Image (cartoon, helix red, strand yellow):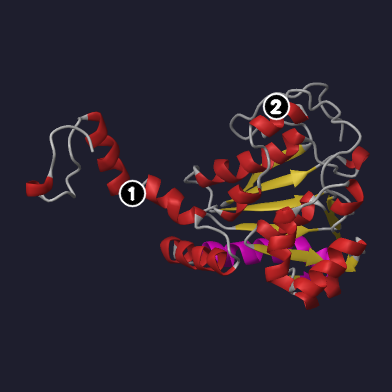
Amino acid sequence: MTHAATAKPPEGDWLGTPYLRFTREGPFGVCTLDRPEARNAMTPAMYFGIKYAVNHVGSDPELAGLLITGTGDVFAPGGDMGGGGSDNWMTFGSALGMDALPFDTLRQSAKPVVAAVNGLCQGGGLQIALCADMAVVSERATFRVPELYRGIADTYYSQMLARLIGPVRTRDLMLTGRTLSADEALDWGMVARVVAHDELAGTAREILAQCCRTAPNARAVVKSSLDNYLGLYDRIGMQSSLRAPEAKEGFLAFKERRSPDWVHPKLRLDGRL
């Protein structure tokens, strides 16, 4: 695929970078990493584009869920260590200020997100797969956490992996930087399912459909409960509260300089709380 020479910030189905494609397949949004010339190495704009895609699907009533996948034999190898190509609208400096990384956004998504891991998956790419609701992986997929070889003390990884696979295996994976096969990753509990490579696309979409048929509010409670098990704070509950009647009344009461209507009449004060 020939990429455009320039990039621009996200808008609509444009994810802000020529290296990500957003397509609509019935009720699903599909985000495809498409930078084969750099083996899908992720620029800051690509990370931010995935974050944007999650929110884009979340706010679109025509879409029920998001599928994330890659091209060729690579899902995502993590951050680009050698330059960003045409992704020049977002540099690493500004990316830090814009909170470009999508991991928390993936976890708090009210709509299901499935990662269809088609090949090599490591670094930030593995974190994307772990933060999706489910990772369905090709038998050809491989997994690695090479951060310590790059001088990065990734404590997000060490905290999450220790709860998913245990501290002993986390030390093995992080301190040696060794590569896991798809079957090993399944045995360790890092991924949900391993399928034949040619069946990955169809299986991932069917699993996403199954997730999307579950009750949204009950699903959010379960996701929040799982976050609590992992020792992560409840982002879904906080996001839901911002759209709930109490939040609307709270903002309205602030604007109108009065106590909210949930306060007992005899306890209300003149002016804002």
**Foreground of the two, 3 or 192:** 192
Other-residue count near label 1 (Cα within 10 Å), few / some / many at <14 / 14–19 / ≥20: few
Q: With respect to residue 173, does 105 lie above or below? A: above
Circle 1 or circle 2, nearest the eye: 2
Other-residue count near label 2 (Cα within 10 Å), few / some / many at <14 / 14–19 / ≥20: few
Q: From which residue to which does the magenta span run?
A: 194-213
Circle nearer the N terminus (1, 2): 2
Residue under the image location 23 percent in, 38 percent down: 273
Return the residue at label 2.
94
Residue under the image location 77 percent in, 52 percent down: 154
Q: Is residue 192 visible?
A: no
Main secondary structure of the magenta stretch: helix
Residue under the image location 69 percent in, 62 percent down: 159
Residue 265 at x, y percent in the picture = 8, 47
Q: With respect to residue 33, does 119 lie above or below? A: below
Mark 1 belongs to which amino acid? Ala
Quadrant in which the N terminus appears: top right
Residue 258 at x, y percent in the picture = 17, 35
Residue under the image location 28 percent in, 48 percent down: 246
Return the residue at label 1.
244
Q: Secondary structure at mark 2?
A: helix
Mark 2 belongs to which amino acid? Ser
Residue 87 at x, y percent in the picture = 79, 27
Left or right of 174 in this view: 97: left
Determine whether label 1 and label 2 are within 8 Å by CB.
no
Instruction: Give the CA separation, mark 1 to mark 2.
Output: 33 Å
Residue 244 at x, y percent in the picture = 33, 49
